[in-house]
Image (spheres, helix red, strand yellow):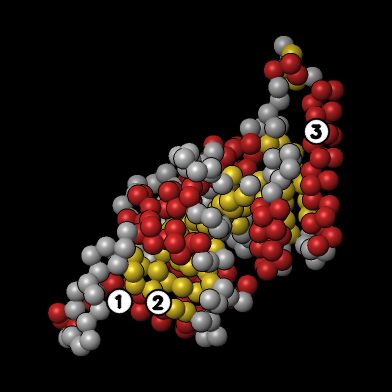
Amino acid sequence: MQPVVTVGLDGSPESLAAARWAADEAVRRKLALRLLHAWPLLAPEPTRVAAEVDQNYWAKRLVRTAQAELQARHPGLSVVGNLVADDAQHALLQAASESEMTVLGSRGLEPVESYFLGDVSMPVVARAERPVVLVRAERPGRRPPTSASRVVVALKLHGSSDDLLDFAFRTAAARDVSLLAVHGRAVPFHARVPWGVDHRISEDMSRDAHEQMSRELHSWREKYPQVGVAGSISPDSPAKAVVEAGEGAAVLVLGRRRHRAGLVPHLGPVARAAIHHGRCPVAVVPHG
């Protein structure tokens, strides 16, 4: 099967924004694009039927309209429409296992009305075996972001995942932008004094963290010499540090551990904070 980027379509502004983002990404990575619309009540495809009695008319129109727009924007892009008579979550998880990445619309903490965004997107992010990217739509009256000049990746500094760093560096390289690696480490209780923070302890912690980050990134700098890399150690909590660093980024890249059989899949606090509060596209990369 040809490598693809899959996007879930449900007709919402968020899913259409996700489709446009996914098309741009597919072009950058020289991949095909699959537009997936899943609905359990899709009727079996008849041989010949008039449009006015075709039960799948609106589903077909949704996919064909998006396909026409994206191919007009990217004439050389291979765009495939895919209608699936299945539960959306199940269909997306199956598609994600076959795709380089899966892209879905996101509304963060705003009211959720879309089928994909509420019951579907979070479980897909938590369960998918390949990267999932959540993309927001611009709201009327909201100032559009300026051109993003970097990709941001959240690091833990203790055996960071190769899958995470490879995705982050490839994403930055595809855009020809720099990469910012961020690590949040709140000041521990023993470093606090009545007048603030013991700067000797905080400086030692910061120096150690920078050295760890440098070791984590060393081989990736050599593998992607065209990508400018910077590191940031924040005295804030990991969630706050990552959300603030992602403001205005092209993509915010986070890791998520794959779940063992029998355990209920869930997202950690950093991933949840980024998905709910971040304004840029958020990529969640499973690893481990």
Query: How far apart are labels 3 and 2 at the CA level?
Result: 50 Å
Mark 3 or 1, which is nearer the eye? 1
Task: Residue under label 3, please give it.
Answer: 206
The kind of secondary structure element at disc 3 is helix
Dots 2 and 1: beta carbons under 8 Å? yes
Task: Residue under label 2, please give it.
Answer: 81
The kind of secondary structure element at disc 1 is helix
Percent from the top left, x then y, of residue 4? 53, 72
- At a point 30% along the width and 77% down the height, the residue shown is 61
- At a point 46% along the width and 73% down the height, the residue shown is 34
Towards the viewer: 110 or 128:
128
State the residue lying farthest toward the bottom. Answer: 48
Mark 3 or 2, which is nearer the eye? 2
Compared with 82, 140 (above or below) is above
- At a point 66% along the width and 59% down the height, the residue shown is 167
The kind of secondary structure element at disc 2 is strand
Give whichever of discs 2 and 1 has the lower sequence position: 1
> Is any part of residue 275 visible from this angle?
yes
Percent from the top left, x then y, of residue 253? 62, 52
Task: Residue under label 1, please give it.
Answer: 60
